[in-house]
Amino acid sequence: MEFPRIHTHFTVKSGHLCYGELHNVWQGASAEPSHGLVAVQPRTTGTVKTHKLDHNVSAQNGTWNAFRLIDTTESCLSGWFVAHESVDVLQETDKILRVSGSPYEEDSGSQYNDEMTMKEGVLVINRYDWGLYDKRALDVVGEDEFDPSTFTLRIGTGLVDYAEANAEVMFWKGVPEGSRDEEQRPHGLWLDVLDNEYSFGRFGFDDEQSAARSFLFFGIQTVFTQTVIAGMRQPLRKYETHEERFQRRLQEGFDFRGMEALKMMGVPSRWGVSPVDEELLGPHTNTDHLFQETDFVALLRQRASNLDFVEPWKDRVVLLLNELLMSYLERYIVPLGKSFDTILTAAEALTPQRAPQQSETGNELRTVDSFLFQHLTQPHTDPIPNWDTTTVAARIRAFLISQSGEQRGLLDNEEYIAGLCRALAFLIGEVLELASNGAKNSYCSNIMPVDIRVTVGNDAELFSIFKYSRVYWDGSE
């Protein structure tokens, strides 16, 4: 049978641990000892999020065992796992990686301390939370003079009993940095990992969240799908192909709406002024839908995409795309049809940015407005295969009449409605083509709402056209 192989051990007697680089440990020993898992909220510092930590935690007394984590591809040390002797090593590492694993791996839980990590009993320590990014007590401990001739890229952290912390710091300070992990100490240990620039830590707490019982230490180069605990052959995380991950997420009920993606992208602030709530339009009723699923598929195939929609998200994609189109019609087209008598004047008013733009290399670039103007004023020279123009045009006209009241204006002009049909097909074709590319870049075999939202949020022209859709922002499809 396989068993995790203990590399070394130490004893906790004070009920607390200090952690981090030498000055972090010293600062942790100078601060009041913490009690239980303390709620820590991330804060924005410049362009990054950090946690302000005191570098000490309450910890179970007794023997703590240290286990080396080995990269099976490179056959090298890639991290450490340290735990109280009562802990089931495999169950504990699995839990920590599920709750808050490496921020560079898919489906690794929370990247910061939040409600989920608090509920699960995990304290998250990220690259900017310790080391030289937190300089408290650095002037007390001092910093070793940098010697480029002996420099080796490495990460290191101490883990030491609170009562012995200052003594251990002074001892380790006298030991060359690359040799500290070789020293056997009764009340602490030093953890080193080569060829890593940034370090991360995760404390696992007991069920009552009264004391830490484990500590996971890893770096930016640690890949848990190819990392094992010394003595074991099974990687700490199962490797999945992109398609396997996508299918698993589908089965697990993963949220593919993309609301978190919009937040991380900084939409809408990246494109300037965003609509206020009173300006948002929708949601509309399903009977108002302009395009059916078959219409969207026809547009996908026209754009040479072999991607499709998949249950249970198919209807949501269809609804979201229709909401984008209907909000566009309601915001821009309904007022237009009442104000102009000819197709040309309406098209000119709708497309103020239709003039070609110049690229940085001097090439002429067509804008979305230029394509819209063309579709509004010129018949299709290359009809869309399997596209029922007559039916779609009838739906568009019915929706516009329902929104326009008695002032129909151009709505009785068949050429105008046909032009709108072509324009909407172009717009949604653009969205679907870009969303298809985004899905492929994410190694997904189907288009999901997140791909639609990211596409619109990433494109200034499409964003300005579709930003008034309430469903786009609230994810209520």
Image (spheres, rainbow, N blue to C red):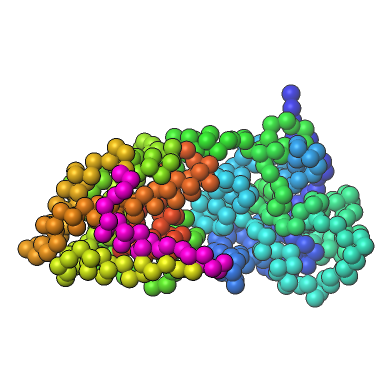
Give the left or right position of residue 368, taking residue 123 as reference: left
Which of these two is toward me, 258 or 429? 429
Relative to 129, residue 211 above or below = above
Which of these two is toward me, 244 or 287? 287
Q: Residue furthest top?
A: 1
Residue 30 location (% of width, % of height): 73, 69
Give the left or right position of residue 50, taking residue 76 as reference: left
Extent of the magenta region: 359-383
Q: Is residue 180 visible?
A: yes
Which residue shows up at 26% across the image and 59% down it?
377
Residue 287 location (% of width, % of height): 18, 46
- Residue 376 belongs to the span the image colors magenta: yes
Q: Residue furthest front?
A: 381
Q: Is residue 17 visible?
A: no
Q: Residue furthest left?
A: 406
Which residue shows up at 38% across the image and 69% down it?
355
Which residue shows up at 76% across the image and 45% down it?
78
Relative to 335, residue 7 above or below = above
Give the left or right position of residue 340, taking residue 99 as reference: left
Relative to 21, residue 95 above or below = above
Image quarter in which the N terminus is found: top right
Which of these two is toward me, 411 or 148? 411
